[in-house]
Image: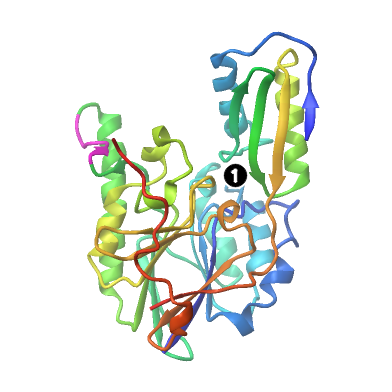
Amino acid sequence: MVIRIAAVGDVHLDEDVVGRFRPALEELPGRADVLLLAGDLTRHGTEAEARCVAQEFGGLGVPVIAVLGNHDHQCDQVPQVVGALTEAGITVLEGDGVVLDCADGRLGVAGVKGFGGGFAGRCASDFGEPEMKAFVRTTTESADRLSAALQSLDCDVLVALTHYSPVPDTLAGEPLEIYPFLGCYQLGQAIDSAPTALALHGHAHHGSERGVTPGGVRVRNVAHPVIKQAYSIFYLGDHLDQAEVSSVGTGGIQQSWS
Amino acid sequence: MTVHDPGAGPPDEYVEAEIHRLLTEDPAVAEQGITVVRTERGLVLYGEVESANRRNEILRRVAGRFPDVPITSDIGVTRTQAPTEIEQLP
């Protein structure tokens, strides 16, 4: 069994970008079973920009599944953005999941935007001012929804899709000071609460590609400025070319906290 | 590389911070992935954007807001070719 997953995040579509991705996207039907979009699909989160996303990523001949990012919330038009994407056949996840029948098996994708908060030992706490508590509770509730969605899916291969990062590994290259705005350990904890095979995220434009959760789940940062191509392709399964298989040990640059 | 140098003195940390916020909060830019670095010769903007128009607009906006600060832009446009390799994960 091999499930072929294409993924990219942070494409920040507007009229000036429409058409740039399309030639590469037209190749997808022969190369991947699904395309996953890891948030920040637009610049400001307007309905007009979402229609640009629909034009660029709709009608590809493969299922397209997305989560939104922080940019997609900027203009407070989330229902309109989701509506425009859904009209184009793009599935938008937020605390829920979907199972796809692929040629070789059933792929489950659970998705949530996620939020910041930081990582173990260097994270925000649910304490103090109302604003601080609201911040951390947003993080916790988002991670809880991801955990429940992952655990609810009956499938052969399980993938977690977020915008914010679940691990610090894939943030290597970003300033340490902004890690709490780029991801949180609670998302990693959610991913480790289920038999997740792969976690994909975006958001960290200056981060690095590869990481692993404390529970051993591979994490890939597919932000467009990181992968520097229209999308990346991952093969998941048990009939892979062993000479080309990536081992768990090939994580991103290990960040020293000291 | 595009250089805007009106021959003014060195920028300070507040200018750096203000430019960084402008890049995100100005609706005409809305970029969080641009790094502002202070050097002896002025400020250098690094990063990648999705179109040449956006790269030009960043320099225009920053130069317009801070006409006395020497600005160097080294911002690229992210490539969009199809991948030539896959990653296999057991």
Q: Position of residue A180 (x, y in %)?
A: 36, 39
Q: Name the image quarter holding residue A145.
A: bottom left
Residue interval drawn in magenta: A121-127
**Is residue B58 highlighted in magenta?**
no
Q: Amino acid at mark 1?
A: His
**Is residue A125 highlighted in magenta?**
yes
Q: Name the image quarter holding residue A192.
A: bottom left
Point 70% across, 17% down: residue: B66
* Chain letter of disc 1 in the image: A
Tell me: A170 left or right of B35: left
Front-most of residues A156 and A150: A156
Tell me: A16 left or right of A207: right
Q: Position of residue A92 (x, y in %)?
A: 48, 64
> In terms of secondary structure, what is the magenta stretch mainly?
loop
- Name the residue that disc number 1 marks: A44
Q: Position of residue A225 (x, y in %)?
A: 60, 51
Location of the N terminus of chain A by quadrant is bottom left
Point 27% across, 38% down: residue: A123
Point 79% across, 23% down: residue: B4
Point 60% across, 81% down: residue: A31
Front-most of residues A9 and A234: A234
Disc 1 element: loop
Front-most of residues A92 and A253: A253
Location of the C terminus of chain A by quadrant is top left
